[in-house]
Image: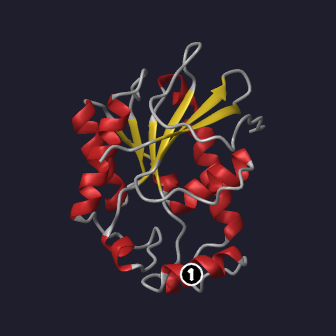
Amino acid sequence: MKVLLHNIGNKFYGCAQFERSPCGFYFARHAESTYNQQGISSGGDRNPGLTRFGIEQAEGIARALGDCEVLPGMVITPPSSRNVDTARIISQVLGLDMRIENALMERFLGDWNEQSSELTASLLKQGITPPNGENAQHFSKRILGSFQSLSRFFDRLPLIIGSRGSSRILFQELTKSTQTHLDNGEIVLVHVASMDLRISNLQRIQPKS
């Protein structure tokens, strides 16, 4: 997937605007999980649910997207509870179909699950592979392959519910952005050039409280 990105440093708050037929996808990180609340790490091999605040965050994502000029055509999520619960709330509010995509699972952290998120984030940034976990190359290849596979839905402008890890791949591998990841409940709109799947723009959408 070749990338051409413009204005990546500019933040866009509000609803998505289109000059032509939309092609691309919304991407949101799942809402706050119980592990996020505790400040401990949770890979794809752990399955915490949402907190009460996380439920409110998911509802805020739905309200923000509901105000956009073009609604998502569907919701795509990995099977983890924190993602599925976020996706289900949004799909119910907006009346959207939901699709499970196994390859979007968060990176498997093995022995680093339930350790300090701050510590594990630092170790991962150094390129260290978690014991009994997934190495960086395999994770990146898996997520990029998932985006490539899902490109067949980009004319429907799907909403992809991802994780910290998949948002990092989106920013660093596909857009070459200086931003490292999305926080819980944050949303971006990714414009894709329809002919060669180049990313042509990325806009940030402000969730509603």
- Helix, strand or loop at label 1? It is helix
Residue 18 falls in image quadrant = top right
Instruction: Work out which residue is located at the far top of the displayed protein and give it.
Output: 20
**In x, y percent, where is residue 62?**
31, 39
Q: Where 200 falls versus 18 (above or below)? A: below
Q: Residue at x 46, y 67 (%)?
A: 44
Residue 7 falls in image quadrant = top right
Residue 178 falls in image quadrant = bottom right
Label 1, residues with CA under 10 Å away: few <14, some 14-19, many ≥20:
some
Q: Where 136 falls versus 187 (above or below)? A: below
**In x, y percent, where is residue 128?**
69, 81
**For this rendering, which residue is in front, 85 or 64?**
64
Residue 49 in sight from this viewpoint:
yes
Structure colour scheme: secondary structure
**In x, y percent, where is residue 16?**
49, 27
Is residue 87 found left or right of 20 in the rendered image?
left
**For this rendering, which residue is in front, 178 or 196?**
178
Q: The N terminus is located in which quarter?
A: top right
Q: Residue at x 35, y 79 (%)?
A: 38
> Residue at label 1?
120
Q: Total label count?
A: 1
Is residue 176 found left or right of 67 in the rendered image?
right
Q: Residue at x 63, y 40 (%)?
A: 148
Residue 88 in sight from this viewpoint:
no
Q: Where 52 falls versus 191 (above or below)? A: below
**In x, y percent, where is residue 165?**
56, 62
Q: Residue at x 51, y 53 (%)?
A: 104
**For this rendering, which residue is in front, 115 or 6?**
6
Is residue 17 found left or right of 176 in the rendered image?
left
| Badge 1 amino acid | Thr
